[in-house]
Image (cartoon, rainbow, N blue to C red):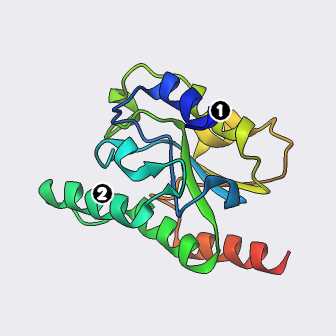
Amino acid sequence: MTKFETDLAAIIGRPSNQRPFVCKGDPSASDIWIVGYNAATAGGDWWRFWSAESGFDFAAWRMDYDGERALRGKNASATRLRIDRFANALPNILETNIYASPSTAMANMPVSTTAAFDLLLETFKPRVIIAHGVPAAEHLQDWSGGKLITCPHLSRAGYAVVDKIIEELLTN
């Protein structure tokens, strides 16, 4: 087990329905992060999708995520559709939130800390952070480790906003 894995387990527990991040494979290969406030859907025990050897199994997690939403009679959220658009255009995206605890709304989020996000940021230093929503942008306003792009919450941002950010990142 890696130090990162041990430290993360101490923060979120094991097993855990918290979602500290998702990505395809090794999080250290993800230099562009999409950061929100907190996840709306947990997707089951996060540790089922993590391996110190191969990283995060995004495909398996996504099947569980989609299944969980389907059980609630929902398709992919507006936020998920926009994150998918980023991921289809840009390689090595990591999705995370300031708070790892999922809730359907900020108002009913359980008591949580930013410790998992802080560990992630300290361990894997992104080149670019796309902070969507005011709380995420405010939390990261003093971050100086790379390029910070802020935008409206992806649940409300139009595809034109997403496409503009993608174009900016592809040309710079």
Identify whether 104 is placed above or below 109.
Answer: below
Name which residue type carries label 1.
Answer: Leu
Tell me which residue sits at (81%, 35%) in the image.
142
Local secondary structure at mark 2: helix
Tell me which residue sits at (59%, 76%) in the image.
160
Mark 2 or mark 1: name the one nearer the start of the chain. Answer: 2
Figure quadrant of the N terminus: top right
Which x, y percent locates residue 59?
A: 39, 67
Judged left or right of residue 110, residue 156 is right
In the rendered image, which quarter is residue 149 located in?
bottom right
Name which residue type carries label 2.
Answer: Tyr
Q: Which residue is mark 1?
A: 119
Which x, y percent locates residue 84?
A: 48, 71
Say how many tags the image has.
2
Rounded to the nearest angstrom, the CA distance separating label 2 from label 1 is: 24 Å
Q: Which mark is residue 65?
A: 2
Category of crowding for the residue at label 1, using alpha-carbon neighbours closer than 10 angstroms: few (below 14), some (14–19), many (at least 20) = some
Identify whether 105 is placed above or below 50.
Answer: above
In the rendered image, which quarter is residue 32 located in?
bottom right
Q: Which mark is residue 167?
A: none
Judged left or right of residue 43, residue 51 is right
